[in-house]
Image: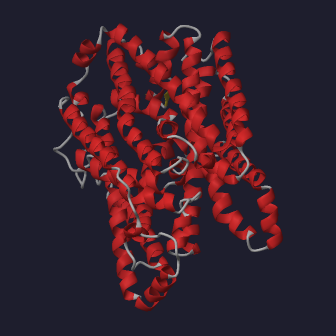
Amino acid sequence: MNSSLHVFDWLVIAIYLVSLMAFAIYLSRSQETREDYYVGGRTMGAWPVAISIMATQCSTNSILGAPAFVAFAAGGGLVWLQYELALPLAMIVLMVFFMPLFRSLKLVSVYEYLELRFDRTTRLVLSGLFLFLRAFATAVTVYSISIVIDLITGIGFFWSVVILGLFTVIYDVIGGIKGVVYSDVIQMFILVIVLLLIFAVLLVDIGGFGSMMSQLSPDRKMAINFSDHGLGDGKTFAFWPMLIGGFFLYVSYYGCDQSQVQRELCTKDIRATHNSLLINGLLRFPLVALYCFVGVGIAVYAANQGDFVSSLPSSNGVPNYNLAVPQYIITHLPIGVVGLAMVALFAAAMSSLDSVLNSLSAITIEDFIRPNMQRSQRLQELFAQHEIYFSRVATVVWGVSTLVMAFFVDDIAPTVLEAINKIGSLALGPILAVFSLGIFTRVCTSRAAIVGLFAGVILNAWLWKFAPNVSWLWWNASGFMTCVFVALIISYLTKPALARVQTTVSENPKVLYFDQLKIGSPWVQISVLLLWFLILLVFLSSFN
């Protein structure tokens, strides 16, 4: 691979990074409280929040990994698109059951709900689990992205980490959540423009969309696989595990993960929150389809150009297919546009990192530092006077920590990168179950919920170790159901403890259960999402 960029390409990258810093400084002028820093004063509109959420999902790993899966992976192809069918259904559940409740409580940390409903131990267990999983995953993400940047630019791994991490941490620290959201909007715009440009150049090289699809291998055209079930047949990406498992995964990720919920809490009212979920539910599929069809173009181009695959960097004789898109960019896009494409890769990386760092900071302050400060009048006054300072310091600490960790994951990163989605699926179902037990039942105790959480994770770990032919997408459902079953059994077997919990909850004036809510009328949005689900189902079936 050509590992050097023209000076004009570097100029494009430098202008982008400097402009991002200036924009963060401008946004910082409106920050006076920690709520301004973490939830933007709850004044943001639906569109920027929705696009920011989409940008976080559209990481560099997605931009490079999805085309590689479509083009080269064994069993790959457009089948990945059926995963997106679960998203509109998940958005409906969030609109009706989760977000109205969280908005009514005016949360900053979503795990605060667990203390209100259960106790502080439950809150800290879930918060600690979030910090561990997200910090580790972020370090691995920094490592993998920096490897790609180094291979494309030739500046070395160390400077790739520094450039990516330093600029992300600086504008995150200065701009707060508004810096995260509005920079994500800019980054998403650049990313979509570059993806469209790459796709257009591919179509010109191949001879048009019709020619591209006619030359694609028939097994990679199939977008829906109804014939397999993933329950022991070794078929990971069958329709039912991707729909059902994906549904539990998306509800948990968008409804119980601080990095996502925090931005949903930034909107000015519940209607804006519903609209942000609606927009995300409608627009995410076209975005995923765009970079999957880039993968289709890469597959056909590679088949026609016999030396393309051999030109990719390899490890132990195996080509690194994740670098297929960057290789095509360097060899087919003109000077200046290559720099813009690099900006798009930076944008995809930064939009994934910035929100995580801000949410790690929020959980550290809201769940661990601020409650301890309130035990002393003097410490409480100190925190109230300098809460923005404490918030920014926490962001710096997490930013530096994840960057340092990136230098120590080199031996395990290649396997972890392949397993990172599995690690998420180990815990996301049980985490969703804990929140669901709080929202929908009045019988579950804190101890029962925590035991159920670990039971769900342990079952999924057993499936990973001893049932490899079961699709890991099913873990999201199995972990959820195991946690609910175990927690309810324990709750009913410990009725004295249950009575004490019910007494405590009845004395709490806050809205803690779904049946206490006035939901509003998100039925128009729900109808649109259901119609969109049916349209997507028909569209994907047309490829079979």
467, 293: nearer the viewer: 293
Residue 231 falls in which quadrant of the image?
A: bottom left
Q: Position of residue 235 (x, y in %)?
A: 26, 46
Any part of residue 263 in sight: yes
Residue 317 seen in render: no
Residue furthest bottom in the image = 496
Where is the C terminus found, in terms of image quarters?
Answer: top left
Q: Quadrant of residue 467?
A: bottom left
Residue 543 in percent (x, y) is at 20, 29
Q: Quadrant of residue 4?
A: top right
Q: Is residue 226 above or below residue 373?
A: above
- Please tell me which residue is depicted at 55% across the width and 12% down the height of the picture: 337
In-image side of 287 versus 194 (left or right): left
Q: Is residue 303 above or below residue 402?
A: above
x and y, in percent, of residue 196 in the image:
42, 19
Q: Quadrant location of the N terminus? A: top right
- Left-right relation of 109 to 29: left
Of residues 76 and 245, which is closer to you in this image?
A: 245
Residue depicted at x 54% and y 72%: 116
